[in-house]
Image (cartoon, rainbow, N blue to C red):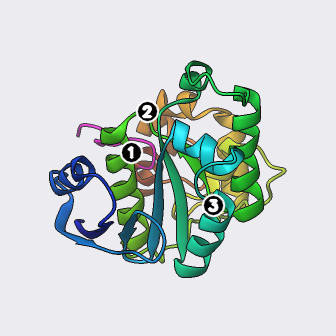
Amino acid sequence: MRVAVTVDDREPAGLVEAVRDHPDVTEVVVDRLSTGDLAIDSVGIERKTLRDYVNSAMGRSGSDLTDQVERMAAAYDHSYVLLEGDFADLATLRTAVSPESVRGSMASITARHEVPVVPCTDRAHLVDYAIRLGRKHVEEPSNRRLPVGSVPSRREPTTKRMYGCIEGIGPELAATLYKRYPTVESLLEASLEDLTEIEGIGERRARTIDAAFREDGRPE
């Protein structure tokens, strides 16, 4: 899936070009955003260098990051602060703020405002991650529920519950399979003939069980 991106007109030309060059972008609009630096549908993204982040979140100069985050949260369904840099780079900033305090600030904004702060190494990775975020939020979510299976209790062993998710396998047969083959690896070592020796499993059901754990199927 490809997306259209709006870039705030106060962002550097290099950022606009990086967004425009991304293979998953259909259109780039450069316009004044009321809040955020990038917008993909209902997803708002604030881009910052590490030094910008420190100044706006913890310094006396620059804009107030808390205010920016609150305005983004009000304007978009999903908001993020993406940073050009990594945690390891904090030690090289030479500011009066310790790396530990900066990381604490990132954690605080993420937890208290529910706006994740994500270090993205550099501009190229930031743009790629931003577009992937936008795509994931814009894509039609799957309505398909994960199978509960015939052994729904979380207290049961995982392998037994997996057996219970196989079509046509009820709780009793799942328990029998688990007793005979306590790991998926041991079941995969079994032949179809081995499976049909279990009461209640014929050739068709044996093939169904076998196919449930093999990507390419068993050769005829």
Q: Magenta stretch: residue 65 in it?
A: no
Q: Name the residue type under label 1.
A: Leu
Q: In the image, which residues are magenta?
A: 212-220
Question: Could one spot residue 199 in this view of the protein?
Answer: no
Q: Amino acid at mark 3?
A: Val
As measured in the structure, the alpha-carbon distance from the residue carrying label 2 to the one carrying label 1 is 7 Å
Q: Indicate the quadrant where residue 75 lies.
A: bottom right
Q: Identity of the amino acid at label 2?
A: Thr
Q: Which residue is mark 1?
A: 126
In the rendered image, which quarter is residue 101 located in?
A: top right
Q: CA distance from mark 3 to mark 1?
A: 16 Å
Question: Magenta region's main secondary structure?
Answer: loop
Give the distance between the C-alpha atoms of the residues marked 3 and 2, in whole angstroms.
Answer: 19 Å
In the image, which disc is placed on residue 140?
Answer: none
The answer to whether residue 128 is above or below residue 152 is above
- Does the residue at mark 2 contact the one at mark 1 (Cβ under 8 Å)? yes
Q: Which residue is mark 3?
A: 115
